[in-house]
Amino acid sequence: MRRHFAKSAVTAAVGVLLVACGGGDGAGGAPGAATAEARMAIARDIFDELGSAASIRKSGVRVADVPTAPLTAIIAGGQGRVYSVPQGLDCETSTCVGNLPQGTVVSLRAVPAPGFAFDRWEANGVCSDFVSCNVTMTGARTVTARFVPADPLAACDVTRSTAGTPAVIATAHPKLLLANAELKACLQEKYARAAPEVMRLKSLVDTALAGGNPYNFSPWFAALVFQMSGDVRYRDLAIARMDRIVSDEEALIAAGSAPRVHGNSYLEVDWYLGNLARVYDWAYDGLTGQQKARWIGYGNQAMWNVWKAPGNATTGMEGRWGDRAHRWSGWATDNPANNYYRHFISAGMQLGLATHGDNPSAPEWLDIFRNQKIERELIPLLNAKVQGGGSTEGTGYGVSTRTLWTVYDTWERSTGERLADKTPHTLASIAQEIHTIMPTLDRRAVVGDSTRSVTGELHDYNRDYLQQLIALYPGERLAGVARGVVMNSSVPRMRHDYDYYSDVLYGLPRTQTTPEVPRSALATSYWGEGTGNFMMRSDWNTDATYGHFQCGRYDESHAHADQGSFMIFKNDWLAYDSIQRSLSGVDQFMSLHNLLRLNMPDGAEVEMRANTIPCRVMALADHPRYSYIAADLTPVYSWRHGDYARYQNKHNDRVKKVQREFLFIRPSTFVVLDRVETTVPTRQSWLLNTPVMPAVNGGEIAVSNNGNSLRVRTLAPANAAAEVVTSTFWNADRSVSRDWWRAEVSQTGTANVFLHVLDTNGAVLSATRSDAEGQVGARIQLADGRTATARFAIHALGGSLDVQGAQGEVQVAGALPATIAPPPVFAGDPPPAPRPPPAVYVPTELNYGGGPPSPAPSPAPAPSPSPSPSPAPSPSPAPSPAPAPAPTPAPAPADPVPAPAPAPLPVGNELVLRQGLNAYQGVTDVGVSNQGTQYNYGKGVVVPVGKTGAFRIDGSQGYEARSFVRFAGLDSLAGRRVTRAELALTFTFGASGYTLNGMVLETAWNPLSPRFGWTARNGTGAWAVPGSGGADWNSGRTFQLSGFNSAAADTRRVNLDPAVVQRWIDEPNSNHGFVLVPTVAGKTSFMLDSSHGVQLHRPTLKLWFE
């Protein structure tokens, strides 16, 4: 490839070079074949170009040879504004043209004028879809924005209740939501005035009325149209559709199966019972007495299984359908922070309200909902653990918090009692949500598992989230800001027809009720204390630089091991969580995040641990010229306690200190300081995940994405070199792959400090080391003429920042704040009073034998090793250093091997082997999965062994888990001849029509190995097929388990080939046990393991001898 670059088009040049450096996005495509020498030459050219670009910016010279292409926007059907992000097109006329850089992706926005509503984009494939319009500017493009008339009087302004209003349930139908006469009248007025959002919903219902079957259609949509129109055809349609659902469920129950509402641990119980309740209530006069009784019976049993069945969320719950027990996990019934919990309370509330007066159980459901769930569980948790709004599940699954807004709104409009104000979490969630949205208003910061879109594009659910909060707080200033965000976002109306109802029920109020407030009214930073999100931006323009830092709780299953991680956005992502490249959205290994990774000499990764002490914010400040946070990550890495689950690593005791300080110098510069100390030499790697393959040159890293750039300079350790790592995501059957990239700067030792300076779009001309006594620092020359000097203590938290203007005037001077001072919500408001930080976390000694930790040792006379930054390099020009060779790791120690007690002697000619029976301790059992790779160093999951001893075995393509079982110590039976062998395994949740194949293993595996999992069978070998298969099995020595019936504890017995067990006795080294392999997609069962509290339910092998 010829390397020729125009000085004015540096970012485009970098983008071309990244392709030359390698990388791909396809079915297993390997990185490009460029040689290391070629890549280094390319990288040097890239950094030369970045330097030239910064000089051009500083000089103010405008270079006009960036190629552009015309984008034509046609406004049709009405009036409104159409503009582009990034800027380049802005019009309120029938037609306008803007010239935008070729090769970039442009997002178009459509904002209706008063008296109109946005309908759709018409672009013949140019737009990404008909609601959101992203245009790739590969040439001239034309799009049409269609608006339709909308009567301004068709907006709902419903009076909200005041604090202290008691709950009163209506005595006549409707009782649910539409008991609010003002709301019902407004919806009927919307229908009469043909509001566009109502007509869209009516059109959807008309499709069903004509015999169609729209995807994910809810019967209550028809009942709502009936309440608005009075047309009984819609009432009858709603009843018929709901009765069909109940009848189908009854047929499954009669056949001995669990109904569909039972699936996925009752996740969709509020869809089933919410539909039932709304149709029951809104179509009440059309129901027969028999239908009412059947529907109530079905709903009551579902809620009994969720809230009252014997058991709990730890042991599982003994639900019932018909005359059969149908056990389920009990998941999240006691966890108000989890999305399942919200679905449960929504279902119970709606069933109780709609059937009140007809249903003897309704008062009980409402009592559990209002007094137990809301008052004693939900509100205390939100106030104590989710301060500042949002969700500790992350920004993906956390969007389900909108279910809470629905609960609050439905209860208030049904009974008059206002729940939203019982916690400041509700109103604060408006601010948190706005700050998680990128300046471009088309995507969000992706934190935790990602749903619907791994890249975080705004979805209907995000629009609904804010619309409901606006409806709850129409008079709040924050609601006015949210209104502007919703109107200018990439989702100007609901995209999916099954979400049309949201624009009907929660459409924006009249402008005089909730006037739009500019986003610039907000402070440019926000701290969600409970979620751990610290979000900052240069300003509120769409081209602002945005930063995100994570330090908080890690105690939800959809949260990630991402404490201390940061992200950077400038018109597009430049540094982010690589979950955005995932094929599933639920990969959780640490290397996806921009943090410090620690590896032991044998390569084992020191993991962050969930449900430990949270990351500690030690200092936090927001200033017009900078934002700053200091985080103590030590407790998340060191994980000190004595109750270790089996087969988990114990390397966390090697961590003494992990701290990170993150400084944002507005508008576009970031400084990151890391301190790390371990008790043994570890490989400490500073990670930067990027949306495209980065270029590296010594300790410098360059990223270019969609016309924007990020440059990273490594100042400490001195002469450290960055390397590019390409990894690959695969789907379950390895038929689809997607590469992802990161740059790593690594050092090996017991103590190090890392200092990095990052900037976007050439904001930094130079960055050099500027240390002081006891401090490591950077002198940064900014492209706008300013000079910044940031220094940080080497051995403790804290530092200083000095910024001088282009004329030498002092803009910032002195120590960085050492207190926690959250920014105010609105710019100019007085901030909350600063508070002192918590104590620095000091790890304690571990007692591996369990029980309380050992007392801390007496202080040694010599201090423990502490980081000493290498001296700053000479300021004189020097050639870029070649990448330092990776240190040679110490020889990996052999994996520890389980040492089971020998099998007891037979009694007569029979022997029963079960963990704990007659002192036998030879059973090894563990599960592996292709998901959840936060476990076992990301080498392929080890399902942790919990106290319930349950394994998930799911054969669906997207998620697969397998169970391994081995009965060891059989060499003590040498000389005995086996005539018969019977295996007994006990399962719960066994699905009908489900078969498990038991495959005798020919391959050794070791669950004590830190590398064991889906991909590796021990510390030195990989499975022939991930998860085991092929050469790993003895396919001729198999058995099957089937006939599951979903009983609470279903024991399946099968005869094993005596020759298999005989070989295990005669040749102990061949005893690798067997693996249970699912054969049917979408089925789930749990095997009770050798730690189960009921000994009879543990895996059992019975042998008969001659």
Image (cartoon, rainbow, N blue to C red):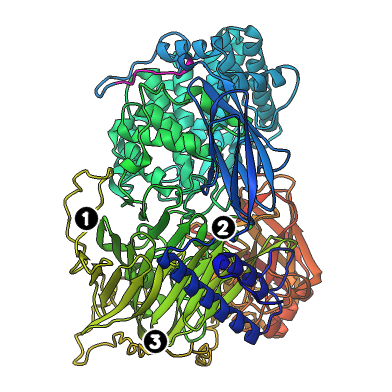
Residue closer to the observer: 126 or 963: 126
User: Of helix, strand and loop, which one carries label 2?
Assistant: helix
Q: Which mark is residue 718?
A: 3
Q: Earlier in the sequence, mark 1 or mark 3?
A: 3
Residue 768, x across and y down, in percent: 35, 80
Q: Is residue 157 magenta?
A: yes
Q: Which mark is residue 821?
A: 1
Residue closer to the observer: 297 or 440: 440
User: Of helix, strand and loop, which one carries label 3?
Assistant: loop
Q: Earlier in the sequence, mark 1 or mark 2?
A: 2
Q: Which residues are magenta?
A: 154-161
Residues at marks 1 and 2 touching, judged by CB atoms closer than 8 Å:
no
Q: Indicate the amino acid at tag 2.
A: Gln
Which quadrant would residue 10 be assigned to in this image?
A: bottom right
Residue 611, x across and y down, in percent: 39, 60
The correct choice, above or below, for 189 with respect to 1045 in the image is above
Residue 1080, x across and y down, in percent: 74, 52
Q: Indicate the amino acid at tag 1.
A: Ala
Is residue 587 shown to the viewer in this render? Answer: no
The correct choice, above or below, for 220 with respect to 107 in the image is above
Q: Which residue position holds label 2?
A: 580
Residue 383, x across and y down, in percent: 28, 43
Residue furthest to the right: 1036
Q: Earlier in the sequence, mark 2 or mark 3?
A: 2
Q: Indicate the amino acid at tag 3.
A: Ala
How many C-alpha atoms fall within 10 Å of the one at disc 2: few (<14), some, or many (≥20)?
many
